[in-house]
Amino acid sequence: MSPAPPPGSPPPQEGASAELLARVPELLDAMRSVGSGLGLHSTLNRICETAADLAHARYAAIGVVDEDGEGLADFVHHGVDEATARRVGHLPDGHKGLLGALIRDPEPVRLGDLTEDPRSCGFPAYHPPMRGFLGVPIRVQGEIFGNLYLTDKHAGEPFTDYDLAMVRVLAAEAGIAIGNARLYEAAQQRERWIDGSVAVTTALLAGGDTDDALQIVAEQARRLSGAAAGVVLLPADGGGLEIVAVDAPRPTNALGAVIPLENGIVAELLAGRPVFVDDAATDPRLDDGPARSYGPVMLLPLCRDEKVLGGLVMPRARGDRPFSRTERALGERFASQAALALTMAEAQRDRERLAVYEDRDRIARDLHDLVIQRLFATGMMLESAQRGSAVPEVRDGIGGAVDELDVTIQEIRSAIFALQQPAEAPTGLRTRVLREITMAAVPLGFTPSHRFVGPVDTAVGDLTGKNLIAALRETLSNAFRHAHAARIEVVVDATAVLPDGRPGVRLTVADDGVGVPEGGRRSGLHNLERRAETVGGSSRLGPGIGADGGGTTVLWEAPY
């Protein structure tokens, strides 16, 4: 090993002028290249490439030291093709070997043959052979950011003192460029989290479906954290936390699953404490199951005024880097903002429910005090006219009208009774379907026809029923806003057989409207598909019930 000169000392003077003069233009070009651009990862790649060119090295890499200073959080390399990198597999973690030694003692190192150094621990299978080695620390604002490694000069010669001097100057410039890139990336990252918080707040306060708003929370959490999934948990009725929203690249059946209170992590979340897992595959606090397939996990409580509203889970893929301190802090702020938005949205819904109750009471009083009394008086007048008529046909006609009035009075009394029932009272799926149809009749201007097949109330589970109601609401809303239909037929069939042979329930909503235009928005249809996929079902379109198949038929089905 050739001893490295102390920091700031010049290389040997013999022949120095010619060597340095020849290479100063290269160094200036390299410094200019390193200083261009603001993306952190692209800056690291550019530093590797520039350093390799400057020192005429075949391979270059930068090991980014983790926040604890005990290993590598990232490893950027140049010179090893992608196919070889895939065969080598896992990147160095800096916990052992020569790279680990440079983390513990960040001083310049120049070796003629790194394989002969006692600190070397060898290469993994498929790793290209390397001999000459040059390692220089990179400091950002006086703190160690990482190390720049160069191996194997193209001519097979060892690295010289001039190479070391040039690379040290480049490393100093690289530290400035990395500092700027880190500041820029941190600002961009904070801006993304702020935008995500605004999107969540807007969705929750827009007065739409609560499930859709929670889904947006899961989507934003996954996108902003770079996680493999975003999961929202809310307290379950029997204790523990229930999974109420999931955003993942593939459909999952996790919706509705309850994580019991006995789980140590659930207890931490319900106590209002964040939990950070370095590796879900080995953490003893996690139960065996799907969670074991992930790597680092960030679990944050949704707290407001010391009350825990739920939890937010962001797992990364196995092998991904752990969440940094900055990401943890931003995630906690996002969770706090989401909890505030949830609280405000719930207060807004309470006010809306109160207004609805007041309207329902007023309507019930008006129906009882005005409409029924007038219908009853009209019926008595018709009965008096019936007795005074000598024409049999007239008496029969008046009798029929009186009977119809009696039926109408009974229906209105049933409606009054329904209006006086709490909206949150437990009801079966059939009743909830009828309620959605009745509510849709007001904006539509007519009541859609309906039909039930099979044991709708007993066969369909709560989770599937909940999503079916949301799908019905979405479909009727689309029919009102876009279809301009004059007739709608709703069928709920609990005897359906799914394409894979499983028993299930099928919701069919057919109309005679204008159909789905080419190139039109598909957000509502995407929502229907997503809801079906979350419970293992599917959604598709077909021809409507208008003339020549005009209109649209939505088929939404899922297993029980």
Image (cartoon, rainbow, N blue to C red):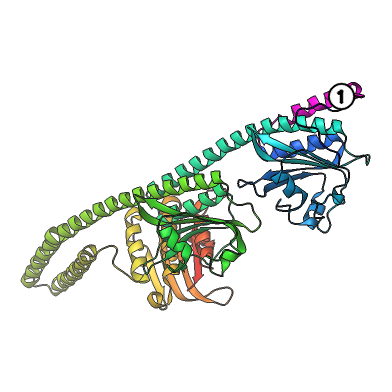
Image-based side of 65 in relation to 542, left or right: right
Q: Is residue 38 magenta?
A: yes
Highlighted range, magenta = 12-39
Mark 1: amino acid: Leu
Name the residue rendered at 74%, 33% in the picture: 171
Query: Disc count in the image?
Result: 1
Q: Main secondary structure of the magenta part?
A: helix
Image-based side of 500 in relation to 146, left or right: left
Q: Is residue 492 magenta?
A: no
For label 1, the residue is 20
Image-based side of 486 in relation to 101, left or right: left
Residue 477 percent location from the top left of the image: 41, 55
Residue 323 percent location from the top left of the image: 58, 50
Image-based side of 445 in relation to 223, left or right: left
Residue 454 or residue 332, whichever sits in front: 332
Q: Is 164 drawn above or below residue 149 in the view shown?
A: above
Q: Is 16 drawn above or below residue 502 in the view shown?
A: above
Label 1's element? helix
Residue 103 or residue 198, whichever sits in front: 103
Q: Hey, which quadrant is residue 228 in on the image? A: bottom right
Residue 514 percent location from the top left of the image: 48, 53
Name the residue rendered at 45%, 42% in the picture: 198
Specify the quadrant that holds the N terminus.
top right
